[in-house]
Image: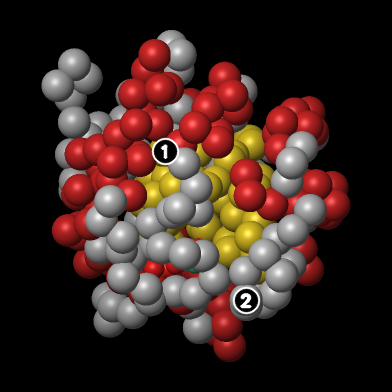
Amino acid sequence: MKRDESFALFAQIDRPLVAPSLLSADFARLLEDVRDVEAKGADWLHWDVMDGHFVPNLTFGPPVVKALRRHTDLFFDVHLMVEAPQRLLEAFRDVGADAFTLHIEADPHAHRAIKAAQSMGMKAGISLNPSTPCEAIRPLLHEVDLVLVMSVNPGFGGQAFIPWVKDKVARIRKMLVELGRPHVPISVDGGINAETGREVVEAGATVLVAGTYVFGAKDRGEPIAALKSIPLPREGK
Ligand SMILES: O=C(CO)[C@H](O)[C@H](O)COP(=O)(O)O
């Protein structure tokens, strides 16, 4: 799916979008892995940016995004697991990030960051950790383009899905419906496979971020197809 198509589609889609998480790709052959998942139907690419402070791990930053931007037209879904994410707005805009998603726990001025990202032409997302209550993001639901619900404690791939996060997804979808914004995408990240993917889609998720499940497969086309085959619940169900 091309970069500029995906957000217009959320009012029409009947399946979740699939965003392979590059955290689980082979960093020594990143371009080959990106080409592989693109050829096999990935809708977005999910970038886990970690700073060693907000989470106890370090990954990549704008130079790596820039290097791959030249090779693909996939939507770049950039997830900032960093302190003071606003510092990085321009840097990621300049290298071709399409969505800039920050953590509510990382920025007391998250609303300002969201407005700034949007004014720079990026989609703006808000993310919350498993133990952060949904109420913490309620005021921002009026304005965000994307909600990213963590279903593991962020920092590492390959962790087990936390089942009670499904209730949070359902609550946030209900809040969005009540606000008259039913098509705002809810993305779920952590421990996603065909089974947990189905559960979160039933709860209201429309984007599935999957690292180990996709990149750990011999044929990445199989997990991508399995996630894409999950039907979205019908409206009014
Ligand atoms: O944000 C992340 C970790 O902080 C990863 O995107 C997430 O954990 C996906 O990896 P996996 O599918 O292996 O759980």
Q: Is residue 210 above or below residue 27?
A: above
At x 28% / y 51%, what residue is drawn?
164
Q: Give the side of residue 53 with respect to residue 159, left or right.
A: right
Question: In the rendered image, which quarter contains the C terminus?
Answer: top left
Where disc 2 sits, the SS reads loop
Residue reaching furthest to the bottom: 28
Question: In the rendered image, which quarter contains the N terminus?
Answer: top left
At x 58% / y 88%, what residue is drawn?
28
Residue 15 visible from this viewpoint: no
Image quadrant assignment for residue 118: top right
In percent of width and height, residue 124 lies at: 64, 36
Which of disc 2 and disc 1 is earlier in sequence? 2
Mark sitting on residue 154? none
Whether label 1 lies within 8 Å of ligand 1 gets the answer no
Instruction: Estimate the spatial distance between the alpha carbons at disc 1 and disc 2, rounded to whole Å.
Output: 25 Å
Q: Is residue 102 above or below residue 232?
A: below
Residue position for label 2: 56
Whether label 2 lies within 8 Å of ligand 1 gets the answer no
Residue position for label 1: 186
Q: Is residue 133 above or below residue 182?
A: below
Disc 2 marks which amino acid?
Answer: Pro
At x 25% / y 38%, what residue is drawn?
203
Q: Residues within 10 Å of mark 2 (few under 14, many from 20)?
A: few
Image quadrant assignment for residue 152: bottom left
In percent of width and height, residue 123 lies at: 63, 35
Q: Which of the four quarters of the rendered structure image does ligand 1 lie in?
A: bottom left
Residue 81 visible from this viewpoint: yes
Disc 1 marks which amino acid?
Answer: Ile
In percent of width and height, residue 165 lies at: 33, 49
Q: Is residue 43 above or below residue 153?
A: above
At x 79% / y 53%, what residue is drawn?
84
